[in-house]
């Protein structure tokens, strides 16, 4: 196939198409990786925003519960119950946020999210127990507001509440209050530590994903730059090879045609290629050989005419009355006629 | 290629080598044709090796002093 110019051009085009295709394929792979990294980054950013939201909701919950305790101590029973009821909104929001985190957390963050959820739930239950214990000691009945149906209940909610009940359920108001004095025993601080740890872990994963994104972006840029440069060089080399393979025999043909045009009909081409240009070169050689044969024939005819006409002139100059010279003239003219006749007949 | 064609070509080549003057070359070719009795340049590779033509060509070349 590479013997013909057409074949070489087809192979060159196919090779260049394959190179370009490979470049596009690798580039699309890189872009796909980049797209995945960006998606992961987006999801992680969203995850982080949901890590921070429970803290805000918890502050609202704590404020409502502190208000409840304060109002109880002030003897404002009705308002204390209202404040207790108001804490439910924040509690429901917290559970929804943790449900999101547990649904969307990656493996490395999921366990931490579940643990934090349980701690928050324990802290929430602790605040309720504290308010209810204060109320009980004051002889007030504080009705626990229903959290259904908006609170998302799961195994961690139940486990956290159960832990808090078993840990704080038997304590008095003063004892419960004393727990809050020390960060090591304060359930809110314990939960906060876990939230901070979750936030920190999320930041670490985010940083890793960003580094992976940067690395993928750098690799994609390198693929574009070096891949394009490589393909460009390959195309230039292939183009140069194909052009040389065509222009070299064309140069040979031009040189030979010029030699033949100058009268060198014995000119022979060296290293005739086996392609289309080679066919033209062979045709030119055949044409040159044929031309030489015809020129030889014309020269032979011209020589014949010269020789015969000289013989006839000599005979005419020696014309005798007996007509012997006339016989010579007739003989020579017949010889000429016969030989030229061979040319005319192509004999 | 036949012997007659080969001999014809050698004769033509010898004339072309021997005579650098084109007119002399033409005359020599004419003399060869007259002496041989046939058009030497018209002999083609596929022609039969006619013994008479071979003999007359050799004789004509010898008469004209052409070394074959």
Image (spheres, grey):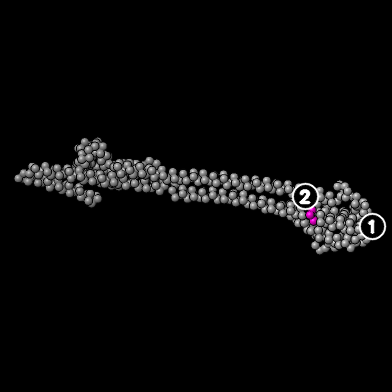
Say above or below: A50 vs B10: below
The image's mark for residue A79 is: none
Task: Give residue A198's position: percent from left, percent from top.
Answer: 77, 49
Report which residue position mark 2 lands on: A198
Say which element carries label 2. Answer: helix
A249 left or right, relative to A88: left
Q: Residue at x 19, y 37 (%)?
A: B63
Task: Give residue A11's position: percent from left, percent from top.
Answer: 49, 49
- Can see residue A214? yes
A116 left or right, relative to B21: right
Q: Residue at x 22, y 44 (%)?
A: A300
- Magenta span includes A56: yes
Report which residue position mark 1 lands on: A137
Residue range in magenta is: A54-58
Between disc 2 and disc 1, the foreground one is 1
Say above or below: A70 vs B36: below
């Amino acid at each position: 196939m590479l013997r013909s110019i057409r074949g070489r051009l087809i192979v060159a085009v196919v090779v260049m198409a394959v190179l370009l295709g490979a470049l596009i394929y690798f580039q699309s792979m890189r872009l796909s990786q980049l797209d995945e990294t960006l998606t992961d980054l987006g999801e992680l950013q969203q995850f982080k925003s949901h890590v921070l939201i429970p803290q805000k909701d918890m502050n609202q919950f704590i404020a409502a519960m502190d208000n409840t305790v304060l109002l109880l101590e002030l003897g404002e029973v009705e308002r204390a119950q209202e404040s207790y009821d108001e804490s439910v909104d924040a509690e429901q929001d917290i559970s929804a946020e943790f449900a999101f985190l547990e649904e969307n957390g990656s493996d490395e963050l999921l366990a931490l999210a579940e643990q934090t959820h349980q701690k928050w739930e324990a802290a929430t239950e602790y605040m309720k127990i504290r308010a209810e214990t204060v109320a009980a000691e004051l002889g007030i009945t504080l009705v626990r507001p229903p959290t259904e149906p908006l609170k998302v209940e799961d195994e961690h909610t139940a486990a956290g509440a159960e832990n808090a009940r078993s840990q704080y359920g038997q304590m008095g108001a003063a004892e419960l209050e004393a727990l809050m004095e020390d960060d090591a025993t304060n359930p809110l601080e314990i939960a906060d530590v876990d939230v901070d740890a979750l936030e920190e872990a999320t930041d670490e994963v985010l940083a890793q994903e960003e580094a992976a994104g940067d690395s993928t972006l750098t690799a994609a840029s390198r693929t574009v730059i070096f891949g394009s440069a490589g393909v460009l060089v390959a195309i230039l080399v292939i183009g140069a090879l194909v052009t040389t393979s065509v222009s070299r025999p064309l140069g040979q043909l031009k040189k030979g045609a010029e030699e033949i045009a100058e009268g060198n009909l014995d000119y022979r081409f060296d290293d005739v290629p086996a392609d289309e240009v080679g066919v033209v070169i062979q045709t030119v050689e055949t044409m040159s050989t044929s031309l030489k044969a015809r020129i030889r024939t014309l020269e032979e005819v011209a020589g014949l005419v010269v020789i015969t006409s000289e013989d006839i002139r000599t005979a005419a100059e020696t014309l005798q009355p007996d007509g012997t010279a006339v016989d010579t003239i007739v003989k020579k003219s017949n010889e000429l006629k016969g030989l030229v006749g061979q040319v005319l007949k192509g004999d | 290629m036949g012997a007659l064609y080969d001999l014809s070509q050698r004769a033509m080549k010898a004339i072309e080598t021997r005579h650098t003057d084109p007119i002399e070359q033409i005359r020599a070719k004419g003399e060869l044709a007259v002496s041989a009795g046939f058009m030497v340049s018209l002999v083609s590779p596929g022609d039969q090796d006619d013994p008479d033509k071979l003999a007359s060509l050799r004789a004509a070349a010898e008469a004209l002093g052409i070394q074959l």
